[in-house]
Structures are given as C-alpha cells and as structure tokens.
Image (cartoon, helix red, strand yellow):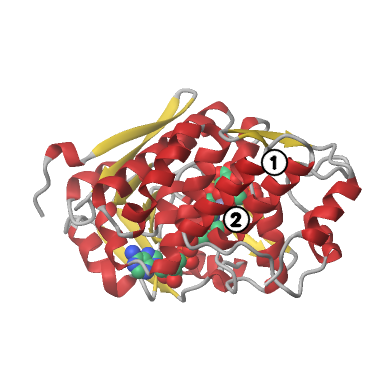
Amino acid sequence: MTRPDDALSTLRVALGERSYPIHIGPGLLGDPQWLTPHLAGRQVMVVTNETVAPLYLSRLRQGLGDDLDVRELVLPDGEATKTLASVERIWDALLEAGFNRRCTLVALGGGVIGDMVGFAAACYQRGVAFVQVPTTLLSQVDSSVGGKTGVNHPRGKNMIGAFWQPRAVLIDTDTLSTLPARELSAGLAEVIKYGLIRDADFLAWLEANMAALRGLEATALTRAIERSCSLKAEIVAEDETEQGVRALLNLGHTFGHAIETHQGYGRWLHGEAVGTGMLMAAELSQRLGWLEAADVARIRAILAAADLPLAAPVDMTPEDFLAIMRLDKKNLDDRLRLILLERLGEACVHDRTPPERLVALLEAFPRR
Ligand SMILES: NC(=O)c1ccc[n+]([C@@H]2O[C@H](COP(=O)([O-])OP(=O)(O)OC[C@H]3O[C@@H](n4cnc5c(N)ncnc54)[C@H](O)[C@@H]3O)[C@@H](O)[C@H]2O)c1
Ligand SMILES: O=C(O)C(=O)C[C@@H](O)[C@H](O)[C@H](O)COP(=O)(O)O
Ligand SMILES: [Zn+2]
C-alpha cells in the first residue's frame, strides 16, 4: 500500500533513559520497516484471536521477513477469556517452540490480547520483548500504551498483572474499517476520558467532531488517536507505575470495573462501563459542589452522542457497587480513592468522599 508521508506520525513514550515509539498511520501492518526494527532476535510469536486472525494475520506476516522463526497462536475471543489460563497457553506455546529470552511476542488485536500478551511477556523467562499492534479504537488510544498488563480475577478486573512496557506500538488506522460500531463507541469512551481529565479544548473538539468519528472519517480518527496517545504518553512519562498522576487515567473505572465484574466479564464492554462510570463520577462531583449542572449535561450529551449507555445495570444495588469498589487497586488504608472532576478538563484523586454522598449517588443514579 502506498502512503503519503504526512499520513504517518510518530510519538514517543519517554521513561527516564528509555523510550519507545508509537507509530500511527494507515498501511503499517504489511510494511516490514515498522515491525522488524523492534524484534529482539529471530524468534517471533504472534498472538491474536479468532476474530482478528482472518482479518489481519496474513497482512502482519507480510511485515515479517522470511529469515525469522515466526510462530502463531490464535486464542478464543472475548473479555471472559482474559484469564491466567489463556496466558498459560501463551507460555505453553513459547516453550513448545523452544523460544528463549531473545524472543519477541507480538500482540495483534484489542486490549484483551494486548493485556494478556504483555503479561505473558513480563513473566516468560522473567521478561522478554513484546510489541503492541492494537486493532480496536480502545486499544489504539489507551491499552497499547503505558505498560499496564494483566488478567481479570472473578472478584475484580485486572487484579493479576505487571507493569511491562512494549518495545513499540504500531497503530495501523486501516484496521478500524472492520470494527463493529458498538466497539467503536466503547473506544470513544476512553477518548472522551482524556478530554475530561486533561484537555478541555480536546473535549470541545470531540463534541464538534463526534459524527465524523462515528462515521470513521480518517482525518478525525487519526487526530483523536494522536491526541489521546500523546496525553497518555505524557502522563505515563510522569508516573509510570501509578504513584500519583497516572491514577487520573482511571476516571470512571472504579464504578465501571464494578459494573463489568458484577455483570460477568464481556456482558458490558469495558468502554461502555467506563462511559457510565464517568457519568457517575461527574454526578458525584456535582453533588460535592465542583461541577455545575451544565457541565454534567455536557458530559451526558457527549456520551449519548457516542452512543454509550447512560444508566447502570438494573440489578446492581448500591451495596453491590460498594462491595466491588472496596477491592479497587487504587484504595489505600481502607479508604476509597475516586477520580473526580474539579472542572471539565481537570480531574483529581479524592479519598474523602463522605460515604452518605456516595451512597446517595448510587441510589439515585438511573438504572436500565
Ligand atoms: N492496559 C491498559 O492500559 C488498558 C487500558 C484500557 C483498557 N484495557 C483493557 O482492554 C480490554 C478492552 O479492550 P478492547 O475494547 O480492545 O476489547 P477486545 O480486545 O475484546 O476487542 C473488542 C472486540 O473487537 C474485536 N476486534 C479487534 N480488532 C478488530 C478489528 N480491527 N475489526 C473487527 N473486530 C476487531 C475483538 O476480537 C473483540 O471481539 C479490557 O480488558 C480492558 O480492561 C487495558
Ligand atoms: O493506563 C492506565 O493507567 C489506565 O488506568 C487506563 C485504563 O483505561 C485501563 O482500563 C486500565 O487497564 C485500568 O487499570 P487498573 O489499574 O484500574 O486495572
Ligand atoms: Zn480503561
């Protein structure tokens, strides 16, 4: 595929002495110049799933030269498969292939594949190289960047994992052409998140361009991916292991992870749960006197424009929420730590929410 040079951009995630590139543009998948420089040695294990394999595996293989020892592992699809058992399948395949510490894992797929492959890479022989090739909007704007890897536990999302950074992130924007609309909306939730926590101008741009984004208009999508990755790269560079500012990336996640866990993994998409969780966080912020009613109305409107759910599950009681939220990884000293909004474009970590205010929000928030 030919590509005008200006259609490609490269950002970097700087981590002290180290850094890695995020390449963004159309046509990256089949082009050897993007993937091969990031391989640690000749041994390459491409891990994908049964939905993505028929769409993009052969294209990715074209980007790997004949002189490499390339193996493929195709896992089942779905959030419910983001388990230690699936990661064990990756380790089994690596051992069966006789792969050593200079092998490279390539994660081809959405956030589920990326999180599992990253975790497999973090642990295999105490750590090997991996490259993220994200194919959903959500994974292109969020999960492929920053090195959070892991799997779910029945009691909570991403409870088992490690911080392990990829060697590179290759975002081929052409892959979005096959993404189902519901998955696109889920990805838009994390895009909106960046505007809410860090960039009010970007939020306004998203409001004005939501139709173009949902219509898969290439220029708009690329701009949204670039701005999201750039904001995430900035935050991760400041705080790689979530000691401080990185927690802001969790806006909507304390509520959202509770929904995903309670409903059974995969029933609500991650982005859908985060979207509803962000509205819950916004309404709580209003109850605490920070956001104005008009701010919350704007948030509700942009989530609706992205076709995201605006109500929590009908069968979830306040106690259901609280029981799961108490296990959230951000909590310290038995205190709930929530990400709330001081204003549009500015978030904070809050661990002093009066319990009765939180319960009132959980009781009043709409159900569907
Ligand atoms: N590590 C992080 O920082 C981070 C950040 C955000 C989310 N996550 C995690 O990411 C996961 C969600 O990721 P996701 O939304 O990408 O879900 P996903 O990986 O389940 O992918 C969504 C669906 O789209 C399919 N798909 C992937 N690419 C496609 C394409 N190009 N065309 C057609 N179908 C395609 C997948 O097979 C799947 O059915 C959750 O587990 C979440 O916890 C992690
Ligand atoms: O990169 C981060 O940091 C995030 O919090 C990004 C989130 O969108 C993502 O869902 C992440 O996996 C959540 O992390 P967790 O630590 O709350 O499990
Ligand atoms: Zn998320």
At x 25%, y 51%, the residue is 218
Measuring from the top left, give residue 265's x and y in whole percent.
62, 71
Q: Amino acid at mark 1?
A: Ile
Q: Quadrant of residue 260?
A: bottom right
Label 1 lies in ligand 2 vicinity (Cβ under 8 Å): no
Which residue of the protein is positioned furthest toward the front in this rendering?
Answer: 294
Report whether 356 appears left or right of 361.
right
Q: Which mark is residue 339?
A: 1
Instruction: Work out whether 104 lies above or below 342.
Output: below
- Judging depth in this view, the residue of 196 and 3 nearest the camera is 196
- Judging depth in this view, the residue of 18 and 368 nearest the camera is 368
Instruction: Work out whether 271 lies above or below 26.
Output: below
Q: Quadrant of residue 324?
A: bottom right
Q: Which residue is mark 2?
A: 274
Report whether 72 appears left or right of 313.
left
Q: Residues within 10 Å of mark 1 (few under 14, many from 20)?
A: many
Name the image quarter holding the C terminus: bottom right
